[in-house]
Amino acid sequence: MAEEEQPYQTFASLYDELFDGELYLDWADFVKANIPAGKVLDLGGGAGRLAVLLAKDGYQVDLLDLSGAMLSLAQEHAQEEDVDLRLLQADIRDFSDWEERYPAIVSFADTLNYLPGPADFEAGLRQAFEHLEDGGTFLFDVITPKMVNVDYDNFCYNNDEDPEKIFMWTSFFGEEENSVDHDLKFFLYDEDLDAFKMVREVHHEQTYPLAEYLAVLERVGFKNVQVSADFGRKQAEEEDTRWFFSCQKGEK
């Protein structure tokens, strides 16, 4: 791998380790409760944690992500668990060259919140719609305005349990309404230098009021839209931190 790519590979691995594995079990349960085992496309599936769980439960999973580093990790995780994943490197806003159609598409872990603006978000939804079979189901989740404006207000988290791998996470309101910027820093100890090296990324997330999500889903053409919270365990409310959507592409 070229030297300039190594920091991104390193950050992808560190970011993958950061995620709570229990959440992926909840996402997997939400999928299994809403769609039967079969062919599914995981949009923005990152390091493949959810895709591997679904594959182990009998789903045939294709994983699409923009990051080559994340896809490399997904391949490693699939090999570790002895499952097959088909990996696609593409932007979820435009993968029209991929002609496959699916009975189900899923997208979790804030993937759609990382799209920078309303036009980008709608483009992602349209690609999901176009790649569904008639009658197919699209499942996704988003963080809510309450999460952005209340939970992330002056948010700061530090983890120094590993003295050679220190993590700092601070969040700030973004320039756009209902947006947030996450400043993520890892400080990694280098024995040769006897010093710490910093690996850093800033992640921008954008969300919208529930009415706007419902309006754009209708505009794209989705039917039977259902919204819940807590991984489908309760009815969605304004004070939730994450909403879960289930919607369908109407049959012709």
Image (cartoon, rainbow, N blue to C red):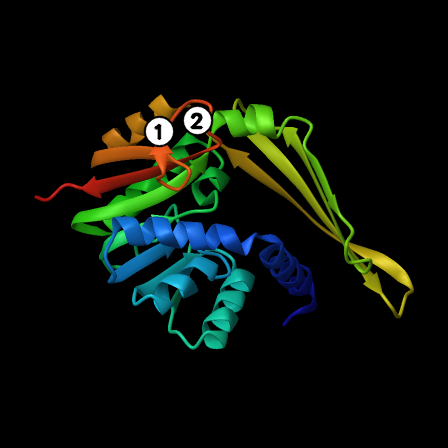
Q: Position of residue 170 (x, y in %)?
A: 70, 37
Residue occupied by mark 1: 213
For the N terminus, the quadrant is bottom right
Residue occupied by mark 2: 208
Amino acid type assigned to the residue bearing label 2 in the image: Tyr
Residue at the spot 47% in from the left edge and 76% down from the top edge: 79
Q: Position of residue 157 (x, y in %)?
A: 71, 40
Farthest residue, direction right: 194
Q: Position of residue 91 (x, y in %)?
A: 42, 51
The answer, for residue 89, to whether it is visible in the render is: no
Mark 2 → mark 1, Cα distance in angstroms: 7 Å
- The answer to which of 104 and 204 lies nearer the viewer is 104
* Rendered image quadrant of residue 175: top right
Amino acid type assigned to the residue bearing label 1 in the image: Tyr
Residue at the spot 28% in from the left edge and 45% down from the top edge: 138
- The answer to which of 80 and 45 lies nearer the viewer is 80
Residue contact at pointers 2 and 1, CB within 8 angstroms: yes
